[in-house]
Image: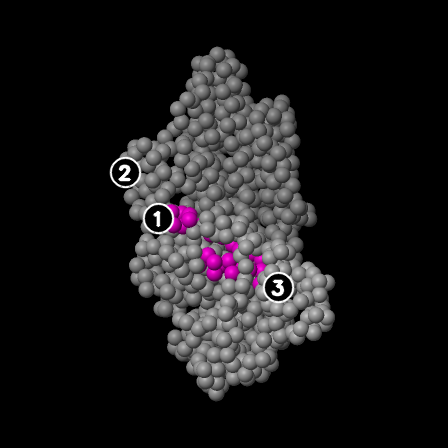
Amino acid sequence: METLSERMPLLDRHWERAELDGLLGDVRSGRGRALVLRGEAGVGKSALLRHTVGRAADMRVVRTVGTESEMELAFAGLHLLLAPLLDRIEKLPGPQRDALAVAFGMRNGDTPDRFIIGLAVLTLLAEAAEERALLCVIDDAQWLDQSSAQVLAFVARRLLAEPVGLIFAAREPGSQFHGLVDLEVRGLEKQDAQALLGSVVRFPLDERIRDRILAETNGNPLALLELPRGLSPAQLAGGFGLVEAQAVPARIEEGFRRRLAGLPDATRSFLLVAAAEPTGDPVLIRRAAERLGVPGSAVEPAEAEELLEIGTWLRFRHPLVRSAVYSAATPPQRRAAHGALAEATDPAADPERRAWHRAHAALEADESVAGELERLADRAQVRGGIAAAAAFLRRATELTPDPARRTARALAAAQAAFDSGAPDMALELLVSAERGRLTELQSGRMAWLRAQIIFARKRGGEALQPLLEAAGRLARVDAGQAREAYIDAMGSAIFAGRLGRPGLLRTVADAARTAPEGPLPARPVDALLDALATRFCDGFAQGAPQLKNVLHTFRQQARSNPDDNMRWLWLSYLVAADMWDDATLHDLAEHAVQAAREMGALHFLPQALTYRAAVHVYAGQFDAAATLVEESDAILKVTGNSYFGFAITLLRAWRGADDAPAQMDAAAESASTWGEGRAVSQSLYMGALVRNALGRYQEALDYAERACRHDDLGATGFALIELIEAAAYSKAPEAAATALRQLMERTTASGTDLALGMLARSKALLSDGEDADRLYQEAIEHLQRSRAAVYLARTHLVYGEWLRREKRRTDAREHLRTAHEMLQEFGATAFASRAQRELQATGETVRKRTIASAGGNLTPQEGQIARLARTGLSNPEIGAQLFLSPRTVEYHLSKVFTKLAITSRQQLAEALPD
């Protein structure tokens, strides 16, 4: 007798099967591929997976199924998928091996970053695929726990030269899978649907009833198979057994429930235990069933009905069978099943799962269960990150009988939920915490967390007042937390910028001055708060000495205290830019990237890469900047975090393409929509910059004046440079003089070579004769000692333009030629064209380059890999830095060798430019 699965037709699935067969072909040829099948329950995704597995007889296949009840157990789905491969875990590099072992509870250790785990999984799959191609099949991916989903999506995006295939099937894929190649699976065409219905309805059916079934099932194969089961011919013939106004999955599940009703009680009890234990471990399930007095043989009727199959693992025929079993049971029956599973689970081997079952078995609040969940939250965090801890603390809160403890646990759960990127859950838990009696410290922490959620969602000024109120409350009970809340308030005002109310920053700085003294030993962040308060209350010159000391401390500790550097980089970087401290800018960004790579902190790495890319831009290293921007974007696609647009916008402005002015305008408009006034000023400054490059000085003056109307940390000083140049070339002496006075205050107080070079350059633009000549040379001397190569090149440019106007053509050519060569080498197209026009005006012929520089044909990623290989790093070491498998690194290096016409790593030193 043919099975239901065999009756599930694939006749009209030619396109889907071709895509899946193409994936298998790519994997066999050594090219990694990932594909997402999406479609409603029962539409045929599982049938396509079975078809694909059947076609992969020459491959090793591992599989897992997401389960709704395990969505809060970190790495549950991933552990099941990789269980057959874990005998290879010792072959992984040490940090990857340890991270994966801790995540799976195989050993104790510090909390591993989930993207180090992702790299470990990528390496493990590549290692397993060395023997024969590997196919990973993940059904019901919409129910994967968040940690597993993020890691698997990360791996899917990094596949390239590994013979590994990943196929996800999901009703509606989560955000982690957005951007992966997907394939929508739809219902059967009418002819195939009618044939399938005829295979289960063996008697004549009224044409209208048949058409109604076909229409309402929308060609869903499982619905066509299950809807008629359990209904008599009379019910079907008259259409009386059809359920009105139900979605197709609900109808399918109802069909399964009808089939379950006909099974013996013991069989239904066995099925319920199996449905409540998603690991599918038949030994554990039988042991738990026996505790309920249900023998192992009770499963046989369900096997005969093809509702499940038992082998190495117990698998339900379809996820909706599991759902139907669980939903058909009464609450007492479910609690009994979870209780039996808790008793049958080894508390030493899997304490989290045991506690989770105990929690589901609890009838009412139970401190012993709640306390166990709270104690295990730290272990859950070590294994699966802060999201796992939040899930345990949330359940502990629900089961806590004592109001005071419930409030404390709810607040801890809310903080964990926010830190894990779940602000909605955090707000829900804060509502729960508010129902209890709060201590003053708890009240302050709750107010601070609410304000942080607002600030995280929109970095404008909306969070400012709540942050100030929270800081005021905390000031009475916890000085350290109060000062950090004031720093957050300062940040909110800084980001709001011109879009906040007038005098906003001064108001916040005044409030921050009322903060209590910080805790001992003194922290850099406390000095930072005091320095910023002085900066915005008393002025730039008065705050500069304190800010310089703070930056010196942050720079000294950037390597020794990476946590503080990463925690406060968003603000310390802006302060360094405000102080023209290019050396500190470089070191803070460099060490932040290094620490984030070493720690695998992919939640922070894109921000660090963005700041490091901006440092590269000012150093004239545009290709290096583009490489880091590309890496940042690739990581953000995996993590789903907010996009950092600063570095790419800055790079576009300096490159000066024809559409760059429009891009700067779009960036300003976007920032205004988000309420980020500082970003508006930044975009206006870059708009002025690109217009100066294009020689549109009057427009540049307008943009620069608008940029300087508000004092924005780390942006206004650079805008003043553009304003003075634009005013000098637009014959606007009053505007230039006013801007120069403001610039002089800032640069003199700073005293760095970059600051003094920019001041001398700006003075020279507004001077004549010997004074101008001396100031230009002074500017070049200072800027040669700085890291700001782009401004050095531009100073050669404006000096050469002045010399040409002074009829000193020979001297002009020297500086214009230097400017042109530097700017062209950087890729600053618009400024290079301006230098070229000036050179031609001196009578010199400028030849276009005909030979590309070495390495010019490499992609950004190839260039990055080649540079790392040139330093002597091995493929695994390069892969660990760039989150690639060693095999993918090898693939890219082979392309590098071909493009550079070399045959070994030793030749990279000569073939690649510095």
Q: Where is residue 276 shown, x and y percent of the image?
A: 51, 75
> With 532 as the anchor, is 851 left or right in this view?
left
Contact between marks 1 and 3 (CB within 8 A): the answer is: no
Please give the residue where the numbered disc 2 appears in the rendered image.
904
What mark, if any, has residue 887 been given in the picture?
A: 1
Q: Is residue 271 above or below residue 61?
A: below
Q: Where is residue 415 shown, x and y percent of the image?
A: 55, 65
> With 812 as the anchor, is 397 left or right in this view?
right
- Name the element at disc 3: helix
Instruction: Please report whichever mark, 1 or 2, sits nearer to the chain's N-terminal start.
Output: 1
> Mark 3: which amino acid?
Leu
Instruction: Please report whichever mark, 1 or 3, sits nearer to the chain's N-terminal start.
Output: 3
Quarter of the image with the C terminus in it: top left
Residue 361: tell me if it is visible. Answer: no
> Mark 2: which amino acid?
Ser
In 3D space, how far apart are the residues under numbered discs 1 and 2 (Cα atoms)? 17 Å
Please give the residue where the numbered disc 3 appears in the rendered image.
197
- Name the element at disc 1: helix
Q: Mark 1 or mark 2, which is nearer to you?
A: 1
* Residue 740 occupies quadrant: top right
Q: Which residues are magenta?
A: 25-53
What is the crowding at mark 2: few (fewer than 14 residues within 10 Å), some, or many (at least 20)?
A: few
* Residue 707 occupies quadrant: top right
Residue positioned 36% across, 43% down in the render:
891
Q: Is residue 802 above or below residue 76?
A: above
Instruction: Please report whichever mark, 3 or 2, sits nearer to the chain's N-terminal start.
Output: 3
Q: Is residue 134 above or below residue 297?
A: above
Q: In front here: 93 or 190? A: 190
Residue positioned 62% across, 68% down in the render:
201
Contact between marks 3 and 2 (CB within 8 A): the answer is: no
Q: Is residue 555 magenta?
A: no
